[in-house]
């Protein structure tokens, strides 16, 4: 499960897992294509991807499974000649500008329209597609139905209702909401911004230099100071433990926790998108997808592209297996998602609907780490230190503007 | 002096390792600091001192340098005094000396990562059944979110106790070694001259005799304070990055140069050089002040 959070946040890494070690699966013979995955948490995924690779007839493929800080390892390996030929990641504009990725537009063929537009957009930089989406993940708000009924609280549909609900649900050692041990600044910064109808970046311009953005971030401060947030839990927001142990009435976490929550609570839970701030805003769910990509430094770009085309375009049976047999993902291809019976009922069905209606890219290619750090720092200072939201947001916007100017001129 | 084959056999592998894994990267980093080096370590665009100018006007970087100068000013004397006091105590004990020495030294053998996780997840976690909060509960106090709260900044309590626990033993051993080198006859002479056993012998015999040890300990402590990384990264960092407060310079540079999507080796290297110069400068200054 731990590995799953990497899909949605390329920021930082927990050294907890930064153990070295790699298993090349089969012994390489020098002729094989190298394919890298990060370590998925669900049992069976590693065997599955090795099975897919083995089934490819044209070229031998060596699968390397990478536990630990995958993003840093991958980024470093792309600088040298020792990197993989094919790997999974989300494209960043910096890697594209540095010529590290091969455009894959010609790989898609007719299947292009079968991919969800919003997901494809997160793999598109300067009009070219650099990754074939493999599996979609998302975050949302989980709430405990019985706790709500007992307190006589309705599921919130605005940010103010969320704060009010969190307050009223705090009683008898139970806190209203858990949104990460940093008090929500990390995971709710984006959703708070989207709740106003704004976004990180729009048309190569800063999208959040607006008093309304400051107002929304100020709401997170209100939530933080309400005394209704669970802080310093043993496991962070990406794991469902605080929610399943009954420490909180609501938790912000991801789709990947649904099986564990179902097992612990049966149907005593519901899910919601992050609510809208006001009438002009919109509810949102952060969505991200790893895509299969080809390393531009590979000596066998054509063979690598052909393998990606075979596995992630042609073999829909493997794509279905990868998305639905192990963890809980939404297939990025509409035809596969449509026949997935697992996704037609209960919380999963709601999640699919949220992705269709309220999806926001959690990690768009043009939201670089410089901008992300500036924005997250600003949110953290407002939420945890009570710094004035308008000046902090203005400062972050100025930094983002410099970065965008560097990228687009 | 001519060296035989045996010399090179023993020194060679180490020297090669040092050259390849330490000196070449340092030189390369210095080189990178003068180039525009985003997503590449073989840059082509020479930018002169621009990276340095950027870093010296980069507010988060300057703030982290400031924070850690304050941190050093606080943690260095504290560790120094506590380690010295403990060493004096352990050195006085007449029985089970080896036991006490080992007990205080053992934490040094503990991994920073493991200790950080114990502090963060077990002792100072924020839920009501954490160790520190259980103790608070006995006195009827509300649970405190130790690593989250910024007003008051409880995370400093977590980080400072952790650092003291991990480091005290090492400096304690250095001090004990220093204490044992002081000739006993100096003390005897002092007592004959009428010096009291407590403060006067400490002030006029022990401390002056410990001068070389003290200088070494201060130097090591100061460098360790500026190079703080492990316990900060593991206690305050998360998968969402590192919060803007208590951010050690090394962590800021790590995210600049190696953080995913960052990969800005030019600015990262320039920052590393600035930090090195700062440590060297403060160390020289300290040496001047102490040895005067």
Image: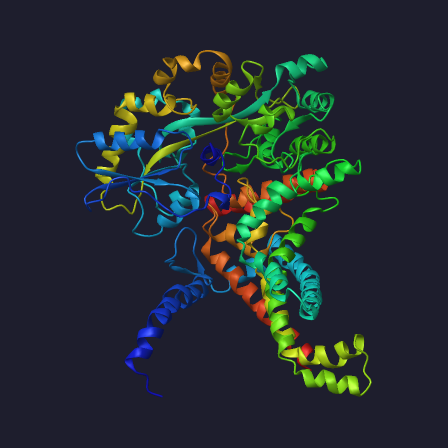
Residue at image position (36%, 74%) is B11
Number of labels in the image equals: 0
The image quarter containing residue B136 is top right
The image quarter containing residue A213 is top right
In the visual, does A104 lie left or right of B165? left
Residue A283 seen from this side: no
Taking depth in this image into account, of A128 and A304 the one nearest to the observer is A304
Q: Position of residue B83 (x, y in %)?
A: 67, 65
Taking depth in this image into account, of A347 and A221 the one nearest to the observer is A347
Q: Position of residue B87 (x, y in %)?
A: 67, 68
Q: Is residue A233 above or below residue B94?
A: above
Spot the residue most to the front. Answer: B95
In the visual, does B219 lie left or right of A88? right
Residue at image position (72%, 24%) is A170
Q: Position of residue B140 (x, y in %)?
A: 80, 35
Q: Position of residue A193 (x, y in %)?
A: 60, 31
Residue B291 seen from this side: yes
Residue at image position (71%, 12%) is A152
Taking depth in this image into account, of A347 and A211 the one nearest to the observer is A347
In the visual, does B189 lie left or right of A186? right
Question: What color scheme is it?
Answer: rainbow
């Amino acid at each position: 499960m731990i590995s799953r959070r990497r899909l949605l946040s390329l920021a930082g890494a927990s050294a907890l897992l930064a153990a070295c070690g790699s298993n090349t699966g089969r012994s390489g013979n020098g002729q094989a294509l190298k394919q890298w995955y990060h370590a998925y948490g669900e049992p069976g995924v590693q065997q599955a991807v090795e099975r897919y690779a083995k089934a490819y007839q044209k070229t031998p493929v060596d699968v390397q499974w990478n536990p630990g800080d995958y993003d840093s390892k991958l980024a470093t390996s792309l600088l040298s000649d020792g990197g993989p030929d094919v790997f999974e990641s989300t494209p960043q504009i910096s890697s594209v500008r540095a010529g590290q990725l091969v455009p894959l537009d010609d790989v898609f063929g007719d299947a292009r329209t079968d991919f969800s537009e919003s997901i494809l957009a997160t793999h598109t930089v300067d009009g070219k597609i650099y990754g074939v989406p493999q599996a979609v993940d998302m975050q949302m708000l989980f709430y405990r139905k019985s706790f709500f009924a007992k307190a006589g609280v309705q599921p919130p549909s605005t940010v103010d209702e969320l704060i009010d609900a969190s307050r009223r649900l705090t009683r008898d050692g139970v806190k209203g909401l858990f949104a990460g041990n940093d008090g929500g600044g990390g995971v709710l910064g984006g959703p708070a911004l989207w709740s106003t109808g704004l976004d990180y970046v729009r048309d190569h311009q800063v999208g959040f230099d607006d008093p309304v953005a400051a107002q929304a971030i100020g709401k997170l401060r209100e939530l933080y100071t309400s005394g209704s947030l669970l802080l310093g839990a043993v496991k962070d927001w990406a794991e469902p433990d605080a929610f399943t142990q009954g420490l909180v009435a609501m938790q912000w976490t991801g789709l990947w926790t649904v099986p564990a929550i179902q097992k612990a609570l049966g149907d005593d839970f519901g899910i919601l998108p992050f609510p809208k701030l006001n009438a002009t805003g919109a509810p949102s769910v952060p969505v991200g997808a790893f895509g299969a990509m080809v390393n531009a430094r590979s000596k066998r770009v054509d063979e690598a592209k052909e393998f990606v085309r075979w596995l992630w375009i042609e073999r829909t049976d493997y794509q279905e297996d990868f998305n639905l047999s192990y963890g809980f993902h939404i297939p990025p291809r509409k035809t596969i998602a449509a026949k997935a019976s697992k996704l037609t009922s209960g919380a999963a069905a709601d999640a699919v609907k949220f992705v269709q209606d309220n999806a926001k890219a959690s990690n768009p290619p043009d939201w670089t780490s410089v901008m992300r750090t500036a924005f997250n720092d600003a949110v953290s200072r407002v939420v945890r230190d009570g710094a004035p939201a308008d000046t902090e947001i203005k400062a972050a916007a100025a930094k983002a503007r410099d970065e965008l100017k560097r990228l687009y001129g | 002096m001519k060296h035989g084959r045996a010399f090179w056999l023993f020194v060679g592998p180490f020297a090669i390792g040092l050259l390849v894994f330490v000196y070449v990267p340092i030189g390369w980093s210095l080189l990178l600091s003068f180039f525009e080096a985003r997503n590449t370590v073989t840059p082509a665009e020479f930018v002169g001192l621009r990276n340095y100018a950027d870093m010296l006007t980069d507010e988060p970087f300057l703030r982290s340098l400031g924070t850690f100068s304050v941190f050093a000013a606080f943690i260095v004397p504290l560790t120094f005094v506590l380690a010295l006091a403990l060493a004096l105590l352990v050195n006085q004990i007449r029985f089970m000396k080896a036991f006490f020495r080992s007990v205080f030294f053992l934490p040094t053998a503990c991994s920073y990562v493991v200790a950080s996780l114990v502090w963060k997840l077990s002792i100072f976690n924020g839920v009501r059944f954490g160790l520190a909060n259980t103790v608070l509960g006995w006195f009827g106090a509300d649970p405190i979110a130790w690593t989250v709260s910024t007003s008051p900044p409880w995370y400093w309590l977590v980080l400072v106790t952790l650092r003291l626990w991990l480091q005290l033993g090492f400096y304690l051993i250095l001090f004990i070694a220093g204490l044992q080198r002081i000739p006993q006859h100096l003390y005897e002479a002092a007592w004959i001259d009428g010096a009291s056993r407590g403060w006067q012998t400490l002030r006029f015999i022990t401390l002056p005799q410990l001068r070389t040890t003290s200088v070494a300990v201060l130097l090591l402590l100061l460098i360790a304070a500026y190079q703080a990384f492990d316990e900060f990264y593991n206690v305050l960092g998360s998968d969402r990055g590192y919060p803007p407060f208590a951010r050690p310079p090394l962590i800021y540079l790590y995210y600049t140069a190696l953080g995913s999507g960052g990969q800005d080796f030019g600015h990262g290297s320039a920052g590393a050089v600035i930090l090195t110069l700062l440590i060297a400068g403060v160390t020289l200054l300290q040496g001047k002040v102490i040895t005067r």
